[in-house]
Every structure is written in structure tokens, then in C-alpha cells.
């Protein structure tokens, strides 16, 4: 789905139900949904045009929300503590004309205790008679909403084949977090997923669909890694071409001075004449000291520096057309 595509939100509350519990995958649009509803209600109450083709919106006495991470070191508040402080303040203010939105209800603490607190909060919200929208990942909260009058489940849709959120809200159905699918897509190995599956459900088996996700992701990572490696090699070779024959360079980490006697190969490795020997060195380990054009004339014969006296004499004789039986030794 293109990121520029807007998915319309169809939403209703206050007639057959007063509370909506929204579940579904991370990055699936749960938080955006509850923010969209609350903001449009506030805009209407302020006399602003709402972002809807058609809307029937009631008047609320107040808008109460708990969204985001309110941890505060200076006030000794953890994520969970900050949520509870905010939630308790909301429960003190809520009435039958309120609209309440809460994100990740009961999160930030032990899952079992967090689930219990989430249900207790829902009980208090329902007693108030107000309207409320909450998001959660707890399966027990989904079950609670399914059995409770005037509270309904809703889910954000998710395509397990493409592993893409569809950003559509379906009221009346509970959703899945799809954590294993998302983790597999992000690169978690199959063995780790099996361990997670066993810890969560007591079995190591993972679905064929999830195996395909992991395998496809692994192949894609290898492909991308190969492309990146080739790109880095090409970049290294390209940078190495900046050095010319005869350039004076500093060789790291000792910062010894040498002269380029052989330009870069495809791996970005050059040959450098040091004071007592020639060495192969990666382009990343050298830095230009003085460019060759500042040291030598354009037609300078570098064999004077890099070749032995014997080789230079033999080359000179060969250039004059003489047939010789000796060999020229190349120092590699």
C-alpha cells in the first residue's frame, strides 16, 4: 500500500455500545484511530470543520486522554507509574458526558497484573457512563470486552501474506498482535521464533507462512548485504583512484611516509614504496601527503625510483631493439 494513500475511518460509538477496545498489530494504526476520533470531536465542539464526509457528533463536557510515555526521572515516575497517575486523575474527572481515550491500557508492568489493572479501569469507565476508546494487546481484555454489555471489540486489519498493516478498523472483532510475524519480518531467526513460541504457547512449531516470511527475509538480507558489499568495494576502488603514481602518502597507523608505486586494484588496495620495502596497503590506511604533480614534472620516469638499476638497464636495451637473454625481475 502506498504511503500516500489515505484509508477512511468508519467509526461509531454511543448507540449500542459506549466502550471500544481496539486490538491489532504494532504500527497497525490503533493509536492513530483513537486520536483521530478524539480530535474530530474536539474540532466539532470548537466550531471547526471535521475531516469527514458526514458526521453526527455529540457534545462532551471534557476530553480525557492517556497517550504516550510520561516517565519522569525528576518526579521518580516510571512508565507504569506515570500512566497510573494519569489514569487515576482521569477516573476522578470522568462523567457520563466525557470522552476518554487510553493507549496501551495496563502496559509497562507485569503482564498478569497489568491485565488485571486494565480490566479494573474498564469497569470504572463503564460505571461512569461516559464514552471511552482504549487500545491493548492483552487477550484477557479482549475476552472481557466480548462478554461485557455496552463494550465491544475492534481490530486493525493486517495482511499476513505481505506483512503490511491495512489501517482499516473493523468494529465487532478482536485482532491479533502478530508479534511473531513482525519479528520474523524484522529479521528474527527461526530458532529464536521457536523459542518464543514455546515460551508463549508451550510448543516450538511455527506456521509454514511464518517460515516463508523468515526464509524470504533471510534471502532478502543476503541480497541487500551483497549489494552493499559490492557498493563499498566500488566506492573504495573509486576513492583509491584518487591516488596517482608518485603521490607521497602517510601510511597509518604509524604515519610513515611512502610513495605510490602501483595504483589501486579493484579492491582498493595500492602498492606503496616505503624506505626499505614495498608494501600492499588498503586505501583506507593512507592519506595524501604531497601530490605527485607537485613533486615531479609531467613526463617524469618513475622507474628511476621504483625499479632496480639492473632492470632499468635491461629495459633501456630492449627499447633500443637489442635482443637479451636475461630476465627482468618484477618485485611484487
Image (spheres, rainbow, N blue to C red):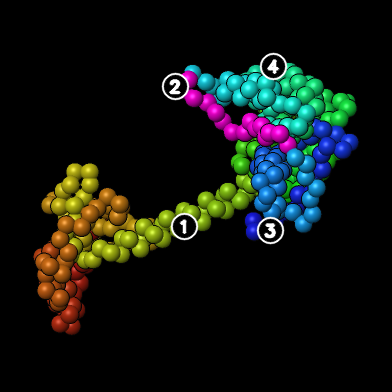
Residue position for label 2 = 74
Quarter of the image with the N terminus is bottom right
Is residue 194 visible in the rendered image? The answer is: no
Q: Are marks 3 and 1 in contact (CB under 8 Å)?
A: no
Label 1 neighbour load within 10 Å: few <14, some 14-19, many 20+:
few
Which one is earlier in the sequence, the residue at label 4 or at label 1? 4
> Residue 219 in the image: x percent, y percent?
62, 49
Say which residue appears at 82% left-offset and 24% top-offset: 144
- Residue 34, image x, y percentages: 70, 40
Q: What label sits on residue 5 in the rendered view?
A: 3
Is any part of residue 167 visible from this angle? yes
Secondary structure at badge 3 equals: loop
Q: Earlier in the sequence, mark 3 or mark 1?
A: 3
Label 3 – label 2 distance at C-alpha = 42 Å
Q: Please state which of the two labelled residues, at mark 3 or mark 1, is closer to the viewer.
A: 3
Residue range corresponding to the magenta coloring: 60-75
Kindly identify which residue carries mark 1: 230
The main secondary structure of the magenta stretch is loop
Q: Which mark is residue 113?
A: 4
Which callout, 4 or 3, points at the residue further toward the start of the chain?
Answer: 3
Q: Position of residue 19 (x, y in %)?
A: 80, 32
In the rendered structure, the answer to whether residue 270 lies left or right of residue 315 reads right
Amino acid at each position: 500500500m502506498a504511503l500516500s494513500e489515505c484509508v477512511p475511518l468508519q467509526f461509531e460509538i454511543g448507540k449500542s455500545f459506549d466502550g471500544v477496545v481496539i486490538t491489532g498489530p504494532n504500527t497497525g494504526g490503533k493509536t492513530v484511530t483513537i486520536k483521530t476520533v478524539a480530535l474530530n470531536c474536539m474540532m466539532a465542539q470548537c466550531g471547526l470543520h471535521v475531516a469527514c464526509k458526514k458526521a453526527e457528533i455529540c457534545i462532551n463536557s471534557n476530553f480525557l486522554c492517556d497517550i504516550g510515555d510520561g516517565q519522569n526521572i525528576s518526579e521518580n515516575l516510571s512508565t507504569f507509574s506515570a500512566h497510573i497517575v494519569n489514569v487515576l486523575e482521569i477516573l476522578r474527572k470522568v462523567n457520563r458526558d466525557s470522552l476518554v481515550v487510553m493507549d496501551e491500557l495496563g502496559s509497562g508492568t507485569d503482564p498478569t497484573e497489568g491485565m488485571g489493572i486494565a480490566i479494573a479501569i474498564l469497569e470504572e469507565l463503564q460505571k461512569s457512563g461516559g464514552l471511552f476508546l482504549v487500545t491493548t494487546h492483552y487477550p484477557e481484555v479482549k475476552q472481557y470486552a466480548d462478554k461485557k454489555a455496552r463494550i465491544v471489540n475492534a481490530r486493525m486489519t493486517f495482511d499476513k501474506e505481505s506483512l503490511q498493516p491495512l489501517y482499516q478498523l473493523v468494529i465487532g472483532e478482536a485482532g491479533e498482535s502478530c508479534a511473531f510475524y513482525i519479528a520474523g519480518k524484522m529479521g528474527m531467526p527461526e530458532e529464536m521464533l521457536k523459542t518464543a513460541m514455546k515460551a508463549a504457547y508451550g510448543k516450538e512449531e511455527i506456521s509454514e507462512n511464518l517460515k516463508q516470511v523468515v526464509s524470504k527475509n533471510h534471502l532478502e538480507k543476503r541480497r541487500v548485504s551483497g549489494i552493499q558489499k559490492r557498493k563499498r568495494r566500488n566506492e573504495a576502488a573509486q576513492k583509491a583512484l584518487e591516488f596517482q603514481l608518485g603521490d607521497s602518502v602517510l601510511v597509518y597507523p604509524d604515519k610513515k611516509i611512502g610513495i605510490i608505486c602501483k595504483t589501486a586494484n579493484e579492491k582498493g588496495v595500492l602498492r606503496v614504496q616505503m624506505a626499505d620495502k614495498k608494501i600492499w596497503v588498503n586505501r583506507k590506511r593512507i592519506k595524501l601527503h604531497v601530490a605527485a604533480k607537485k613533486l615531479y614534472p609531467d613526463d617524469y620516469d618513475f622507474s628511476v625510483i621504483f625499479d632496480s638499476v639492473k632492470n632499468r638497464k635491461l629495459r633501456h636495451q630492449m627499447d633500443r631493439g637489442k635482443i637479451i637473454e636475461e630476465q627482468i625481475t618484477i618485485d611484487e
